[in-house]
Image: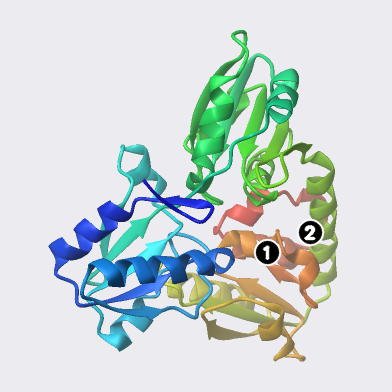
Amino acid sequence: MYKIDSYLIPLDEVLSILSRLKAKSIFLEAPPGVRDLAFMLSSLIEDNVDVSIYHSGRFTWGFCDVGINDAKLLGVDAILHVGHVNPLRYCSGRGVHIENISSIPVIYMPFYYNIEAPEDAITDVCRVLSKYVYVAYPVNYEITALQILKHLPRDVSYEANVMTGCYINAMDKLDMYDQILVVAGGFFHALTFKILNSNLKVLNYDPHRGKLYDVENYFRRIYALKVDSIRKCLNAKSFAIILVNKPGQYNLKLARDVKKLLQENNFKSIIVCTDEVSNNLISLYPNIDVFINTGCPRLAFDNIDQYEKPLINPGEVKTIITGRLNSYSLKLLLNNSITI
């Protein structure tokens, strides 16, 4: 591993892959919070490989969010996607891996925060864990997570794995665990478990703050906002179906099916195509009452207090049409089924 500022990166692997691909030009993309890493990484690559680098100006939120259209426009030989990995490929023992998307090699390069948990923080974590625990972490926090695992009490049994905001290795057996420990900055990843099963006891250790949190109160606040947002939809007359054109989220059939369902129930709707869902987009359509998101389902939950109009997912449309708010559950948030 190569240490660069506060990060560890598999630089040699990346250089080897670029040489093997004989890449003369690449499209470099990274999440918003680590553009500093992307800048430093590009200098290291240019010092070692004869290659032209184009930096992405897009937001990049996950391994499903790859700038294929920009890469095609530029005619580059490969995309270097920094910070996210396909968890299925990573769990098979591979760090850097390549996937061909629309005939373009996409190099997924993880980075690791070089953060060790202080002794008192590890003590706090070990004090509250008991019985059977599932430990999950985004790949970037693997160093801290593995450090904590080494110090768990002997009477604590655990399973551990890499996760993303939409993928958990143990998704079908979460009821088996007495507690969930997520090692990650912020609550985004921890909320994944609460959305899947609101009865789970979920703790979040934030390596940047060195503190352990119970996410229950935060989840309840967001959930209450979500239910209130659904309630506001019940009197809606007009809808905009947001068709997200990111390669890993694009679903034209779903957008058309939602529009057909709304038409059959005498609701007016339009389809809006975009790369990014934000309040700026919503504000462009003052005559629309409700926006239906066909992209990443987390958009209609985590940032719900940032939208001036309700943003819902396709599975939640049935609640609007039937008006049965008392039957609403977060399972509808993640379910794209629009059958009433």
Q: How many marks?
A: 2
Q: Which residue is mark 2?
A: 226
Q: Quadrant of residue 193?
A: top right
**Amino acid at pointer 1:** Ala
Give the x, y percent position of residue 124: 75, 25
Q: Is residue 58 above or below residue 334?
A: below
The residue carrying pointer 1 sits among few (fewer than 14), some (14 to 19) or many (20 or more) residues within 10 Å by Cα, namely many
Q: CA distance from mark 1 to mark 2?
A: 8 Å
Instruction: Report helix, strand or loop for mark 1.
Output: helix
Instruction: Report helix, strand or loop for mark 2.
Output: helix
Position of residue 86 in the picture relative to residue 324 (left or right): left
Which label sits on residue 223?
none
**Amino acid at pointer 2:** Lys
CB-based contact (under 8 Å), mark 1 and mark 2: yes
Q: Quadrant of residue 268?
A: bottom right
Q: Residue at x 65, y 56 (%)?
A: 333
Q: Which residue is mark 1?
A: 300
Q: Is residue 75 above or below residue 258?
A: below
Front residue of this view, candidates 212 and 115: 115
Q: Is residue 97 visible?
A: no
Front residue of this view, candidates 266 and 47: 47
Position of residue 89 in the picture relative to residue 122 (left or right): left
The residue carrying pointer 2 sits among few (fewer than 14), some (14 to 19) or many (20 or more) residues within 10 Å by Cα, namely many
Counting residues from the N terminus, which is met first, the one under dot 1 or under dot 2? 2
Q: Quadrant of residue 131?
A: top right
Front residue of this view, candidates 94 and 246: 94
Q: Residue at x 40, y 69 (%)?
A: 66
> Which quarter of the rendered picture does the C terminus lie within?
bottom right
Give the x, y percent position of residue 305: 80, 66
